């Protein structure tokens, strides 16, 4: 199982965009649990990013919410940002 490390920017984004939205918070924790056990599960649509975010990856929480992260070895990821498609890309 992969271990997630929360970047300070991710913590701020989580508080701002997710913490107060009960439904989004529930979906986030479900998707994070799935991601940590199976990072390339089909439902997550995990993909590499390009351009200014080259070297980073993202997975989907729902239709419009994405989590941007970086692989930090085989068993750790650094969560960098969370928000809508337009907010994080």
Image: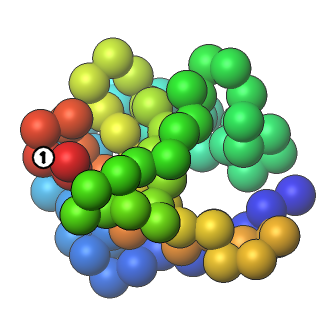
13 relative to 22 in the view: left or right: left
> Measured from the top left, where is residue 23 in percent x and y?
35, 25
How many discs mark residues in the rendered view?
A: 1
Q: Secondary structure at mark 1?
A: helix
Residue that sits furthest to the front in the current view: 51
Residue depicted at x 73% and y 28%: 41
Quick one: quadrant of the N terminus?
bottom right
The residue that label 1 is drawn on is 87
Residue depicted at x 32% and y 71%: 11
> Measured from the top left, where is residue 75 in percent x and y?
82, 70
Here the colouring is rainbow
Whether residue 79 can be seen here: no
Residue closest to the eye, 71 or 62: 71
Residue depicted at x 39% and y 22%: 62
Report which quarter residue 56 is drawn in: bottom left
25 relative to 38 in the view: left or right: left
Residue closest to the eye, 50 or 60: 50
Task: For label 1, count other residues whose C-alpha is less than 10 Å away and answer few (under 14), some (14-19) or many (20+).
Answer: few
Residue 4 position (above or below residue 34): below
Whether residue 74 can be seen here: yes
> Measured from the top left, where is residue 45 in percent x and y?
55, 26
> Measured from the top left, where is residue 54 in percent x and y?
38, 62
57 relative to 23 in the view: left or right: right
26 relative to 35 in the view: left or right: left
Residue depicted at x 40% and y 49%: 49
Residue 30 position (above or below residue 16): above
């Amino acid at each position: 199982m992969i271990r997630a490390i929360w970047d300070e920017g991710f913590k701020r984004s989580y508080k701002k965009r997710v913490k107060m939205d009960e439904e989004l918070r529930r979906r986030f924790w479900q998707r994070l649990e799935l991601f940590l056990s199976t990072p390339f599960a089909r439902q997550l649509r995990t993909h590499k990013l390009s351009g200014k975010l080259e070297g980073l990856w993202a997975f989907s929480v729902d239709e419009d919410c994405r989590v941007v992260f970086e692989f930090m070895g085989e068993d750790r990821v650094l969560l960098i940002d969370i928000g809508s498609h337009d907010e994080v890309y």
